[in-house]
Image (cartoon, grey):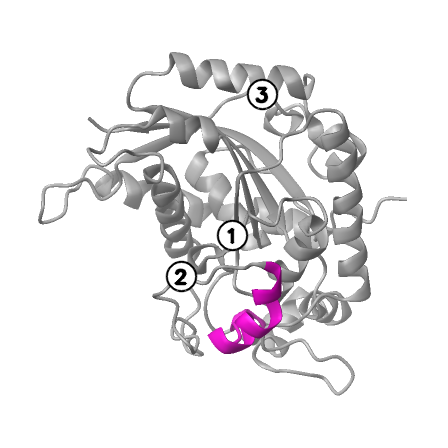
Amino acid sequence: MSLLIPTENDYDDAHGDIESEVAYREQFNKVKDEKDAEGKYLFPWSFEVVNGFFKQSDPKTDDSKFNYALEGFGKEKPWAEIIDELNSLNKSAKNNEVYKLIFFARHGQGYHNVCVNKYGLDEWKRKWHSLKTDGELVWAPDPNLTELGYSQSTENNEAWKREISIGAPIPSKFYVSPLQRSSRTLVNTWDDIKPRSLKPVVTESIRETIGVNLCDKRSTKTVIEERFGQYGFVIPPDFTEDDELFTSDHRETMVEQTFRVNSFLQNLFDEDLASDSTVDRTKVEDHTFISTTSHAGTIRCFIIALEHRHFTISTGGMIPIVVKATRKL
């Protein structure tokens, strides 16, 4: 039996707070063509979802019941055809267009998720979010996976091995939230699959909603290195020792977080540029398939930034999205 079952809370995470989604679009439309002091666009890339590859992008798919692990990741055609079509799209693309398949994975169940299930979302928001423990559970700061969370990542590991055996591509780049639950999920999912030369990059811009909820405060740089350096994790030079982004008096809004993940996407596609800021087709060919491991709130914001349909992601779940990015000329 699959452990990747969406809950009512997961559905609410994916479908609630439409007002913030509308607010993001209004604010983004006001600044999307702005330039910095050097005359460069602040948001040079625009994004759209390419349908016809995965069932998750089809509005007829019931996201409250869909389980990608039992349905071949939701692919609508064999992997060989998906890979060939993406390669063909990139080869025929205009000189400012890039296509990628990005796998957006959510961490397995953490102890903070157990607390929410134990007391309910209203009580979590009222009381427990700012605490470390109730005397039985310890869920903050930076909680680990539960036994179920580890088992969910094991199910993902087995699902990936099945899909790879029938032609699924192994991503060439891995990005991971600095929070332990996401990093553990990546390790358990991928460590015996991907080549050791593919080193996950610890990325602040894809962490969970920042502030107030103590479970979303990350560990120090030193602790992260001690835990995950052995797995080849790369921590960027500007990564601070302490979590300087977390504050106890302001929780990042969905609008703020969506701008944050949009910046991640901007940087991701910028990595395909040559020194003269034109698209380098060799880089595009080498890095068509990308993995991110993050959080429910983060994936919701990716979905907003990409204008993908709302889709429920269980703890430990994943959604593949084919993205077309177009750079302003």
What numbered label is drawn on residue 83?
3
User: On screen, 35 above or below 214?
Assistant: above
- Image location (x, y in percent) of residue 90: 42, 19
Question: At x 72% / y 65%, what residue is drawn?
Answer: 145
Q: Which quadrant is the C terminus positioned in?
A: top left
Q: Amino acid at mark 2?
A: Pro
Q: Is residue 54 above or below residue 109?
A: above
Furthest residue to the right? 1
Query: What residue type is disc 3 on?
Result: Ile
- Amino acid type, label 1: Thr
Residue 41 position by quadrant: top left
Q: Which label was assigned to residue 236?
A: 2
- Main secondary structure type of the part rendered in magenta: helix
Relative side of 180 to 317, left or right:
left
According to the picture, the residue beneath numbered tag 1 turns out to be 298
In front: 54, or 30? Answer: 54
Q: Earlier in the sequence, mark 3 or mark 2?
A: 3
Which label lies toward us, 1 or 3?
Answer: 3
